[in-house]
Image: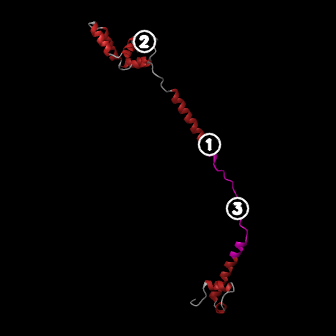
Amino acid sequence: MKHCLSERALLQVHNREGTAVQQEHLRWCADCVERYDQLVEDLEILHHVLEAAPPAVEVRRMMPFSIGWVPMAAAAVALLAIVVSVRLLRAPTTAPLQVASRSTAVSAFAADVSAALFAESAATTTAALATTDAPYLQAALELGSPCTRDRYFGGACDDQLSALILEGE
């Protein structure tokens, strides 16, 4: 195969552009004849494929967005609405002054009231009243007796939180 024709020379012979020497070699060399026949078959296959109409392709219409996420989104919105409504229903309302004054500072207020009521002289009473915070003192005086567990269950008061806190101390 040292002197055999190249693929380009075989193609030139097929296109009738080959030289007389190339055509003479093709008549006598069995290897080149075999390669030439294979080249002719390949070119015929290419010719048929290129002339044939393209195969029919099934065209599917795709929806731009699938609707599989819609139930999940609706469930998420419903869950969010439930959480927000429960949160709003359980939000603490503004506490009146009575509830705020019945905290752990009640004993401090009681001590101030006791000092003011049982002072030895009028000058000391005036001085004691001037140093305390008037709104807190007024609230302590208006509250009356604290709401204990017995008073709460007896219906004498309605502050369940104070009844439980005062009984625990």
Is 58 in the magenta?
yes
Residue that mark 3 sits on = 57
Above or below residue 9? Residue 150 is: above
Residue 26 image position (x, y, % from top left) = 65, 90
Is 50 in the magenta?
yes
Magenta residues span 45-70
Q: Is residue 77 left or right of residue 37?
A: left
User: Depth check: 22 or 154 in front?
Assistant: 22
Type of amino acid at the residue the image marks with label 3: Val
Taking the spot 53% from the left edge, 32% from the top edge, the residue there is 84
Q: CA distance from mark 1 to mark 2?
A: 56 Å
Residue that mark 1 sits on = 70
User: Depth check: 165 or 90 in front?
Assistant: 90
**Outermost residue, left direction?**
120
Residue that mark 2 sits on = 151
Mark 2 or 3: in front is: 3
Q: Quadrant of the N terminus?
A: bottom right
Above or below residue 155? Residue 44 is: below
Disc 1 + disc 3, Cβ < 8 Å: no
The secondary element bearing badge 3 is classed as loop
Q: In terms of sequence position, does the residue under pointer 1 or pointer 3 come before the other?
A: 3
Q: Is residue 125 left or right of residue 83?
A: left
Residue 33 image position (x, y, % from top left) = 65, 87
Q: In terms of sequence position, does the residue under pointer 1 or pointer 2 come before the other?
A: 1
Q: In terms of sequence position, does the residue under pointer 2 or pointer 3 come before the other?
A: 3
The secondary element bearing badge 2 is classed as helix
